[in-house]
């Protein structure tokens, strides 16, 4: 390794200048200016301190937050929502599709009111949302759009859940649909919305949805409880350069034997960075190198960062080089134990999952503060790593781990805060699978004795009966909607359902498990066995659930759990004291999870894998809870032309 050029020649020039110009006050001033100019260059071998050089632009120029419309696009505004009364929020969305290059590679991307990702919705518990969606996408192969509100229970508004084929037919080109629903008073946290028609989510039809928790008496709020001043959203996920339909075709091709297509890139808040020279020759891309997006944290010591995995296939690990992060909630505000360690790295967050973090900025040690005294903003890195599990075939053009500049907009002279120092004794990594919840209150005692029990078995297989294409199933049934314009199940009689949803193989019939009795105090234990050698993050619509057990496969054992087998049930332990409340749960390879939740939301709700390729080949099942009200059924059919 070559040593950097020494500063001796420049120092000598400076001394010479001083000697020759030291004849008057003005000359001396000029010399001092020149001396300063030379001495602030890196001194390298002379042993001087190396100043921090920002990549691109002047040191004073602050890189903007990722986002298409300025640096504050992903900064949230809790103060505007937590102190006010509940209200109705009217939004008008025009959905279009246009060529964009989020990471430098051109691709046709969905835009909502010209934006990718779509505009962030901020609301409070109890608000009513009225979102008028106009579909201005005229691609002949699209067949319409729909929007699902991921994590919201949609109580009393099953027909607004956005699941094409189940709760609505797709919004046809040039058509309108108005989503209207009230956010339950009990719900607050980090949510998101995304397409639930075809594979449009992978072409960018998604955005953030944050439900702020109203302040209690004496203005006590999350801001005071967790002592943060700013809140920011981070949408992070893998990204494919080809259009989603083409990627799905590739996945279903019998020659690819069920290997998941590996992503090409990753995006944070809709922006990324791609090394064009890595693009595979056989698959050229229209690529231009972009400046790496940076993350700028607000002007405070602690930030609440709401992280959503908006990706398609990969779990995500997030790390920061300075400071620490602590998980305070998962998914839609599911509280995490207060003793959860503050760490530098947290993962894995699977597609559809969210985590709320308190990020505490690094406080420099004495020597570091000396070096960085000239920097008004403390600089670090935020690193995103995509998990390999669904990358059986390696994409050599993918940079699986990427670091982005992380800046704290902190004013000069901030007093050090010993609390935020990441000491060597603290754990540097936190595994989200180890997160525990808070102790449940007495109002949730029903969790200990659910009246209903159900067991599901999920698989993913290449099927000869489906022309050697992959088929995902849950209890032998698949959820695939071949015609997005067809009337949804919610508008049909139960006897018509099996005929309405075509199955991938003739051996299958659509089955819909039915929890006939619903209502306050009625609970179910749902066991979900995964008979696949890959893990799957399952998402349940209309409910959040408590995860009372997760089983990781043990070699040479029968790892499935049948709760109806008294011997097995007597061996099984469950955590009903401090379970996590979630709406998306990773089921380990050949393992299982045991979920318990209240059957308090009547309707038809999907339970499906959130890896989009798995979902697209059928890995999902519809659950019926209670009865379907006549007016819901009526409204569900209104959008559909036939
Ligand atoms: Cu899956």
Image: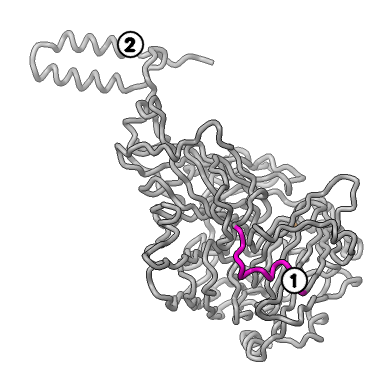
Q: Measured from the top left, where is residue 38 in percent x and y? A: 29, 19
Q: Earlier in the sequence, mark 1 or mark 2?
A: 2
Q: How many marks?
A: 2
- Quarter of the figure that contains the C terminus: bottom right
User: Is residue 493 depicted above or below 210 in this figure?
Assistant: below
Does residue 562 show up? yes
What residue span does the magenta drawing correspond to? 439-451
50 left or right, relative to 381: left
324 left or right, relative to 170: left
Q: Quadrant of residue 632?
A: bottom right
Q: Nearer the viewer, residue 305 or 598?
A: 598
Where ligand 1 lies, by quadrant? bottom right
Q: Quadrant of residue 301?
A: top left
Q: Measured from the top left, where is residue 538 in percent x and y? A: 71, 61
Q: Which residue is mark 2?
A: 9
| Secondary structure under the numbered disc 1 in the rendered image | loop
Q: Which residue is mark 1?
A: 450
The residue at the point 89 percent across, 64 percent down is 566
Q: Quadrant of residue 202?
A: bottom right
Q: Residues within 10 Å of mark 1 (few under 14, many from 20)?
A: some
Q: Measured from the top left, where is residue 564 in percent x and y? A: 87, 67
Extreme left residue here? 24
């Amino acid at each position: 390794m070559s040593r950097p050029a020494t500063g001796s020649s420049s120092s000598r020039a400076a001394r010479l200048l001083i000697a020759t110009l030291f004849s008057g006050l003005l000359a001396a001033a000029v010399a001092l200016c020149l001396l300063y100019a030379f001495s602030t260059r890196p001194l390298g071998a002379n042993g001087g301190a190396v100043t921090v050089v920002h990549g691109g632009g002047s040191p004073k120029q602050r890189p903007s937050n990722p986002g298409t419309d300025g640096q504050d696009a992903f900064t949230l505004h809790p103060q505007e929502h937590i102190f006010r009364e509940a209200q109705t929020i009217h939004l008008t969305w025009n959905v279009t599709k246009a060529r964009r290059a989020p990471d430098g590679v051109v691709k046709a991307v969905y835009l909502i009111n010209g934006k990718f990702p779509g505009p962030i919705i901020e609301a409070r518990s109890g608000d009513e949302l009225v979102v008028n969606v106009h579909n201005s996408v005229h691609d002949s192969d699209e067949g319409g759009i729909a929007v699902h509100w991921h994590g919201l229970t949609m109580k009393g508004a099953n027909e607004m859940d956005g699941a094409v084929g189940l709760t609505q037919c797709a919004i046809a080109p040039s058509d309108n649909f108005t989503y209207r629903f009230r956010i339950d008073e009990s719900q607050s946290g980090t949510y998101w919305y995304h397409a639930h028609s075809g594979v449009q989510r992978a072409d960018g039809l998604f955005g953030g949805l944050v439900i702020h928790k109203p302040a209690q008496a004496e203005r006590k709020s999350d801001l005071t409880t967790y002592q943060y001043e700013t809140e920011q959203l981070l949408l992070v996920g893998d990204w494919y350069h080809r259009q989603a339909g083409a990627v799905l075709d590739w996945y279903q091709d019998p020659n690819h034997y069920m290997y998941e297509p590996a992503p090409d890139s990753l995006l944070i808040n809709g922006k990324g960075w791609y090394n064009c020279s890595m693009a595979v020759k056989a698959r050229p891309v229209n690529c231009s190198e972009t400046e790496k997006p940076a993350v700028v944290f607000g002007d405070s010591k602690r930030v609440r960062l709401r992280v959503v995995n908006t990706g398609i296939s990969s779990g995500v690990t997030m790390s920061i080089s300075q400071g620490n992060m602590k998980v305070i909630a998962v998914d839609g505000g599911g509280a995490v134990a207060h003793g959860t360690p503050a760490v530098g790295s947290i993962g894995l967050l699977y597609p559809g999952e969210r985590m709320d973090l308190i990020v505490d900025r690094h406080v420099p040690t004495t020597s570091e503060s000396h070096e960085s005294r000239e920097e008004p903003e403390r600089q670090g890195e935020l690193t995103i790593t995509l998990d390999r599990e669904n990358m059986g075939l390696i994409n050599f053009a993918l940079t699986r781990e990427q670091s982005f500049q992380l800046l704290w907009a902190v004013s000069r002279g901030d007093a050090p805060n010993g609390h935020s120092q990441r000491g060597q004794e603290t754990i540097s990594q936190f595994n989200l699978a180890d997160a525990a919840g808070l102790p449940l209150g007495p109002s949730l005692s029903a969790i200990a004795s659910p009246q209903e029990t159900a067991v599901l078995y999920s698989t993913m297989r290449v099927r000869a009966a489906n022309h050697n294409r992959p088929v995902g199933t849950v209890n032998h049934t698949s959820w695939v909607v071949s015609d997005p314009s067809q009337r949804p199940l919610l508008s049909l009689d139960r006897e018509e359902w099996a005929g309405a949803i075509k199955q991938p193989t003739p051996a299958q019939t659509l089955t819909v498990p039915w929890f006939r009795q619903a209502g306050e105090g009625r609970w179910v234990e749902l066991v979900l066995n995964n008979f696949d050698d890959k893990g799957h993050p399952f998402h349940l619509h209309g409910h959040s659930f408590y995860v009372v057990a997760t089983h990781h496969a043990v070699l040479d054992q029968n790892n499935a759990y049948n709760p109806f087998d008294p011997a097995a049930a007597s061996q099984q332990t469950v955590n009903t004291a401090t379970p996590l409340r979630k709406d998306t749960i990773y089921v380990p390879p050949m393992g299982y999870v045991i979920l318990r939740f209240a059957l308090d939301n009547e309707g038809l709700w999907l339970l499906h894998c959130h890896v989009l390729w798995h979902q697209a080949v059928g890995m999902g099942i519809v659950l019926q809870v209670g009865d379907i009200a006549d007016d819901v059924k009526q409204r569900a059919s209104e959008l559909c032309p036939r």
